[in-house]
Image: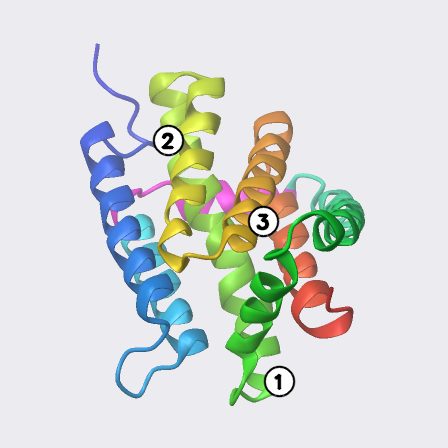
């Protein structure tokens, strides 16, 4: 039986995952690359990965457009609600962790230190139009979607979530890795249940803006 034309080959998806691992491990290990600070670098990584995914998956953009046309307003509203729920979970998690874990406050401060020297407007624009939606386009809309079709819905969810978490390990920041694991499970499960990258993209983007700009933890 031939493979469905609207999914990349499994080997292609693994190659994309490998590229993502290399790019993000380097990002979290070094945090800057020549004239590129953390924010320009992560934006470039996501642009490269999303562009590659769209080029290799001929139906990906059409799938995203169909997702938006089919109840797009309702999905966006649910995404905002999901972002608020996740923010609440992180707020509670921070409250508990800084009281129980000696390293938690320092790790959280280190994450916010990445904003140093970067224009708040630039961070907002990158988060809103590239980083937030782009991460969902790639991790859920490309990798989880493809692996769920090839390997099964739950294995695809677990594999994409595991890789999303592992690339953050290079940061050496336990709280950032934990945050990635929680976020990966949350958005991955949303995608598993709704099959909507629009919903997860709105949720991820709104959460990014809340955590980094509007209501830092």
108 left or right, relative to 75: left
In terms of image quadrants, where is residue 89? Answer: top right
Q: Is residue 123 above or below residue 101?
A: below
Residue 88 percent across, percent down from the top left: 80, 49
- Pick whichever of labels 3 and 1 is earlier in the sequence: 1
Query: CA–CA distance between discs 3 and 1?
Result: 22 Å
Query: CA–CA distance between discs 2 and 1?
Result: 35 Å
Residue 146 got which mark? 2
Q: Which residue is mark 1?
A: 120
* Mark 2 residue crowding within 10 angstroms, few (<14) / some (14–19) / many (20+): many
Name the quadrant of the C terminus: bottom right
Residue 28 got which mark? none
Q: Which residue is depicted at the point 39% across and 22% down?
A: 149
Choose between 21 and 61: the one closer to the eye: 21
3 left or right, relative to 126: left
Q: Examine the structure image and report whether residue 90 is included in the region drawn in magenta.
A: no
Residue 9 visible, this orientation:
yes
Q: Which residue is mark 3?
A: 179
- Say if mark 2 contacts mark 1, CB within 8 Å: no
């Amino acid at each position: 039986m031939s493979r469905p034309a609207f999914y990349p080959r499994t080997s292609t998806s693994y190659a994309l995952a490998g590229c993502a691992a290399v790019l993000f491990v380097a990002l979290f290990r070094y945090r800057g690359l020549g004239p590129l600070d953390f924010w320009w670098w992560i934006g470039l990584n996501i642009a490269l990965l999303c562009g590659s995914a769209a080029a290799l998956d001929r139906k990906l953009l059409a799938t995203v457009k169909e997702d938006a046309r089919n109840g797009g307003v309702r999905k966006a509203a649910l995404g905002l609600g999901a972002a608020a729920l996740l923010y609440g979970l992180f707020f509670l998690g921070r409250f508990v962790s800084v009281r129980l874990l000696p390293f938690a406050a320092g790790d959280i401060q280190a994450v916010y230190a990445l904003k140093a020297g970067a224009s708040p407007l630039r961070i907002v624009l990158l988060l809103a139009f590239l980083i937030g939606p782009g991460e969902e386009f790639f991790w859920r809309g490309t990798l989880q979607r493809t692996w769920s079709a090839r390997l099964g819905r739950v294995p695809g969810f677990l594999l994409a979530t595991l890789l999303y978490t592992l690339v953050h390990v290079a940061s050496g920041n336990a709280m950032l890795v934990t945050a990635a694991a929680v976020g990966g499970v949350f958005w991955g499960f949303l995608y598993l249940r709704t099959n909507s990258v629009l919903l997860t993209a709105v949720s991820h983007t709104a959460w990014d803006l809340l955590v980094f700009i509007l209501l830092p933890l």
